[in-house]
Structures are given as structure tokens and as C-alpha cells.
Image (cartoon, rainbow, N blue to C red):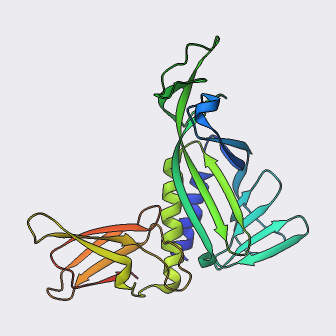
Amino acid sequence: MTHYTRLRDEFASLSTCAAIWDIKATQYVDRAQARAFASTAITRERAVFSLDTCDLIQWGETLPHLCNSKGGELYLYPGFILYRAGKTFSLLDFHDVKIRCSYTQFQEEEQIPKDSKVVGQTWKKVNKDGSRDKRFMGNFQIPLVRYGQLSLKSESGLWEEFMFSAPEPLERMLKAWGVFTASFGAGEKIPETTASVVTNEDGVTGIVKGILRHPTTGAAWAGVNMSLKSKTTGEVHTTTTGCGGEYEFRVVSDNYDVIVDE
């Protein structure tokens, strides 16, 4: 239960973000016509993450609980995900859910959460180069705030997107998620076709890089501890996959095995 405990702890940390929003809609914006800085407009509403219990399937401890703005709920059990909407519910395999995180510079016109970082400034109306469009009276400056975004999707129809005022806890939770789901099939070899070797100018040292995906579901594995072992020398390199399952090793040949650590 160690990997699950870590996932639950990181989720608890994520739930303490000063602001969590459910992304209800994302709409394309014609920047030239709207004189806007951003190419998309997001409709959002506050959401709640917490450790809670579920009356449908009893368990002795509290569970990571995601609740969207419409009342839909996700409970992360040690072996499956329960999705509940009103009187209906369904069970999902962790490996069937594709999880992604990203970072965004959001134009924040509301109060800036206390744990957020302002990374720049823009204007309500801008020129093509991003400068202030002086043709508009009352054109005001808007802070750009660095937020984290989380996406959960499955082929069965699950599609949830959330935004967080502090991206760092989100990244830690994503890594814990990756380690937890990878523990279901620890030690499975990843086909070498998922990686490529890039040779440097010296013609010797290369970089093995690629996207780690589950061999059955094809979903990217984030936060997974990986090892690369040279078939020639036996030398072992280690790394942890990034938010989109990406990994990179510095090696001296292309004769290697990429494995998921136990």
C-alpha cells in the first residue's frame, strides 16, 4: 500500500491549494479580431478536492475525492476509480484513465490566490505584438498568473479538467499517480521503439529519449522510476518520467534495455 499511501498524501497536499477550479468549457478566440492576448477563453467554477469516504463502497480509510462543479464525483480507491453522478456510478481501471498536467499563464481578472505566482502582465486589449492597444479607452493591465491544469480522460467517456492555483503540488501528485499505476505491472519491459538515440557531435555520447507508455493501454506513464541498462557494459542509468511520460538518458551506445523499476 506504500505507493497508494504516497498518492493519497500528495493528493491531500494538492487539495490545500488556495483555489481549485473545474474547467467547464474552453473556447477558441480570434486574437486579431478580439484584440486579445490569449487564444482561448476558459469558463471555470470552483471545485473541491478532499479526503473523504464514499457510502457506495465502504473502506476503512478516507479516499482522494474529486468533485466537479456539476456534482460529479471521483473516488480513488487502491484498486480502481469510482465515478458517481447522482444515482448512477461506474468503476474505472486506473490504467484506462489518461492523466495529463500542463502549465498555463492565465489572465487573472479576479482576486489572485495567495499561493499563486504572477509571471507577467498583459492588457485587456493588445496589439499583435502584445503591446497595449491605445485605441481603447480604459484599457487596463491584467496580471499573468502561473497555474497548473489537470486532465482526466478515458475511452468510456470520462473527461474532467481542473485548474490549480499552485502547480507544484499538482506535479508531485502526478508523479505519485504514475508510480502507483506503474506498480501494477512493475518490471515490464518497454518496447525499444518507444525511444530514440540522438548522437552528439563527438559521435560517441548519445541521448535516449522517448515517451513511456503502458504496453497494454498505451497511456503515458508520468512520474515512473525507470532504469536503462546497457547490454554491453551492464551500466545502469536511472530517471523519472515527466508530466507527459517523457524520459531522457545520456548513454554511450544504443544497445540497451529500458525497464520500469520495481
Image coords of residue 258 (percent x, y): 33, 81
Quarter of the view holding residue 124: top right
- Relative to 135, residue 2 above or below: below
Looking at the picture, how far across and down is residue 41, in whole percent? 66, 40
Quadrant in which the C terminus is drawn: bottom left
Q: Is residue 29 left or right of residue 121?
A: right
Residue placed most toward the observer, 1 or 164 = 164
Quadrant assignment, res 245: bottom left
Image location of residue 128, percent across then percent down: 50, 29
Q: Residue at x 45, y 66 (%)?
A: 223
| Residue at 26% over, 69% down | 249
Q: Tell me if I can see residue 14 in this picture.
A: yes
Indicate the position of residue 22 as horizontal and vertical percent values. Answer: 71, 49
Determine whether, in the image, residue 138 is placed left or right of residue 172. Answer: right
**Residue at image point 50% right, 66% down:** 176
Q: Is residue 151 above or below residue 185?
A: above
